[in-house]
Image (cartoon, rainbow, N blue to C red):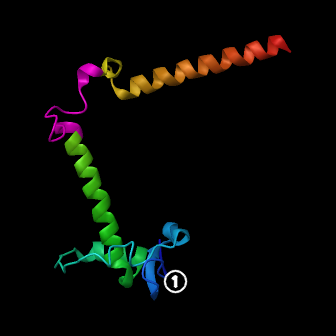
Amino acid sequence: MYRLQRHRCRMCGEARRAVLPRRLLTKAHCHCTLDMHMPTKRAHVLLPDDLLREIDQLVGPRGRSAFLVETARTEVRRQKLLHFLENGSRVVKEPAWKEKDHPELAKGTAAWVRKVRKESDTRARSRQEKRKRDH
């Protein structure tokens, strides 16, 4: 959720009101950290009416830009990571993730997670039994 917040910019000292996500309010984020001192360009973006209404319900009409910038940056980071994992880096042209390096996942990740949890539960039970015997 976004909220209008009064604060003084730590970078330039300018007093401002900014629309910020609630989780960022304690970190004293401001227009400087939200890329407002960086060169920016206007982009004409078409959004469906229902999506715009949902965004406005979350952040209000004055918080659209900050919300869209944060959302776009998150998605760009995610896409870059996926590209790296699938295609490797510029230096190493192999994917970072190779199935042959992870034979424990051959039966699927769900099976592997169940196995690891079962092993953990077994170790925990044996430790508890040992403590009972020692006391």
Q: Nearer the viewer, residue 59 or 57?
A: 59
Q: Nearer the viewer, residue 49 or 60?
A: 60
Q: Amino acid at mark 1?
A: His
Q: Position of residue 113 (x, y in %)?
A: 44, 27
Q: Which residue is at 19% across, 37% downward?
A: 86
Q: Considering only vertical position in the picture, is 53 above or below 80?
A: below
Majority secondary structure in the magenta region: loop
Q: Position of residue 28 (x, y in %)?
A: 51, 73
Q: Is residue 48 left or right of residue 4?
A: left
Tell me the quarter of the picture where residue 107 sits. Answer: top left
- Counting every numbered tag in the picture gives 1
Q: Position of residue 23 (x, y in %)?
A: 51, 66
Q: Nearer the viewer, residue 97 or 103?
A: 97
- Give the farthest residue toward the right: 135
Q: Considering only vertical position in the picture, is 7 above or below 131?
A: below
Magenta-highlighted residues: 85-101
The reply to whether the magenta stretch includes residue 118 is: no
Which quadrant, please, contains the C terminus?
A: top right
Q: Considering only vertical position in the picture, is 31 above or below 81?
A: below
Q: Is residue 87 left or right of residue 126?
A: left
Which element is circle 1 on? strand
Mark 1, residue position = 7
Res 15 visible: yes
Q: Which residue is at 23% across, 26% downward?
A: 98
Tell me the quarter of the picture where residue 91 sits. Answer: top left
Q: Dot 1: within a 10 Å radius of its alpha carbon, few (fewer than 14), some, or many (20 or more) residues?
A: some
Res 53 visible: no
- Give the farthest residue toward the front: 12
Q: Nearer the viewer, residue 87 or 135?
A: 87
Q: Position of residue 132 (x, y in %)?
A: 81, 15
Q: Which residue is at 19% across, 81% downward?
A: 42
